[in-house]
Amino acid sequence: MFDKILIANRGEIALRILRAAKELGVATVAVYSTADKEAMHVKLADESVCIGPPPARDSYLNIPALVAACEITGADAVHPGYGFLSENARFADILAEHRIAFIGPKADHIRIMGDKIEAKRTALRLGIPCVPGSEGAITDDAQALKVAKEIGYPVLVKAASGGGGRGMKVAQTEADLLNAIATAKTEAKAAFGDDAVYLEKYLTKPRHIEVQVLGDGLGRAIHLGERDCSLQRRHQKIWEEGPSPALNAEQRAHIGGVVAKAMAELGYVGVGTVEFLYEDGEFYFIEMNTRIQVEHPVTEMITGIDLVNEQIRVAAGSPLTISQDDVRIHGAAIECRVNAENARTFRPSPGRITYFHPPGGLGVRVDSAAYQGYVIPPYYDSLLGKLIVHGRTRTEALMRLRRALDEFIVDGVETTLPLFRTLVREPDMQNGQYDIHWLEEFLKSEPEIGV
Amino acid sequence: MKKPQGKPTVAKAAPAPAKGHEAELEIVAALARIARDHDLSELVVERGGLHVRVARGSQHAHTTYLAAPAPASAPAAHASAPVAAAAKAVESGEAPGTVKSPMVGTAYLRASPESKAFIEVGSTVKEGDKVLLVEAMKTFNEILAPRSGIVTQIYVEDGTPVEFGQPLLAIA
């Protein structure tokens, strides 16, 4: 086991990592920008090092500063959290050169899954079903038109270096295709430095269903069930739940089995999420996230397994101690990502939290680094915290969520709590009848969003 | 920069007390004993105009930065009358002309162990003069004086880890 973990992140996930490290008896180092001096995890860590001014590129993305912080504290492992450098293969390589462990997958697996074309090729090779599409990048207009015709319109143009919902353009008909490709290429070059694009069939009403995996790189990998993350606004997830209301036990076991076998064959180390679009009973691989994810608590609540704990253990070289048979799904869990934003306009609302009362009680979990008096800095994402509820059934979870949302008080900044209070009362949400377009269509209908 | 609770560090020698301050010295000595016996990492007492802070452990706590830390001197433990750093409460703690570290690393006051230090308290420096080195990832980075003047404080010792924004020295 490691002696000392440096947490290369901030906010709620930094606190999450700190908690797991403490429970493992491992010393903790918090690094922070000057804007995060009063962060909760900085207060709780054994040691802390200021690594730079507020901008992420000068602090949380500043590899030399992070390595130097490891040097001066003697940290022997780095946990990168999510976002920032968590899927930066170069960072993993540099740490390896300095003989510091990177709590995550092998750099090569990060690289493979970071290139969406390569990821798809690898998935296909491993037997994971994929969205029908071009084989590799689009080389010229003639090829694009041919492939699109084979797949059938509408068609999605996707950036190879994109991901997380970025760098995508829809071509509804053949007339739109070449223009969509040209626009996508220009934008991709600007955003990701790489204009390679590929085509995929555009699914009209899919759900976003992702499978949580855990591997030890020693030939073993298991799946821990799925999460349904269809509720998205501009490709940002806001509500996630597990199990998916759309799947039955056979489907779960089937797709889970396919994914676990693939990860074992790949020799994947650590936690990861294989994301699918699901439509009409079929699963289509879109991408794999080679890190711990924001919505991991959903899986923790329904399986009782501490994913960050397991992640640290396998990174330290321990074989998996959980077998697939040990993984049991109990009840249902729902997570709401509460942002410091106006619930109607989604305008960010940084500032001082003057009153903070999170909900409690059986089956209620709040993963948040916020506290009364905390000043939310304006430089980073607006995630205030995650409210996760668990119930023996989905209905119980929904009742509990409604109760917990009504109890959650945050004054001083605007939050999206009112949006969730509205959503939990929506019949479609209660019936689990939604797809990836549902939320944007709901918001377009200008619903009454209370307080 | 917060550092872990470690072994008690050197008790900093207070400036030689003026005659008639024996009572204060006794208070300080008694507090130091209490801190040690009860394994307290920090103890602060205010009485009248006297403010005493006894700290066992890091001298780099990221709280109020004292304007004039005495250079660490006496070895720990067996000194007959361990004397803590008696310090007046300082509000902002920064001397004028403080130069802060632009990076994370290890600060060095000299080019090599055998060399003379680049500067000392009282040295006159010109803007652009090399005053310190901060090493990270086996690369030595020169810290240059941002202005001309006289070095009034040096806040770090040779080989001290420093964080971004940490006061290194003051040039007035």
Image (cartoon, grey):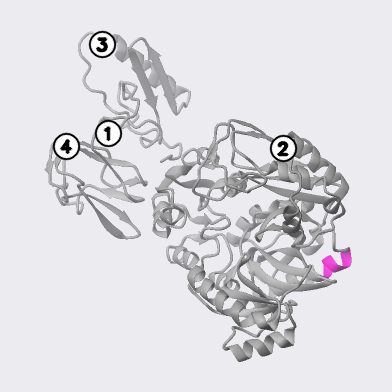
The answer to the question of whether label 2 and label 3 lie on touching residues, with beta carbons closer than 8 A, is no
Q: CA distance from mark 4 to mark 1?
A: 15 Å
Q: Position of residue A353 (x, y in %)?
A: 58, 34
> Which mark is nearer the camera, 2 or 1?
2
Q: Position of residue A142 (x, y in %)?
A: 61, 91
Instruction: Report the number of discs.
Output: 4
Q: CA distance from mark 2 to mark 1?
A: 58 Å
Q: CA distance from mark 4 to mark 3?
A: 28 Å
Q: CA distance from mark 2 to mark 4?
A: 60 Å
Q: Which residue is mark 3?
A: B21
Question: Front-most of A92 and A409?
Answer: A409
> Which mark is nearer the camera, 4 or 3?
4
Q: Secondary structure at mark 3?
A: loop
Q: Which residue is mark 2?
A: A451
Residue B121's disc is: 4
Boundaries of the magenta span: A249-254
Q: Amino acid at mark 3?
A: His
Lower position in the chain sequence, tag 4 or tag 1: 1
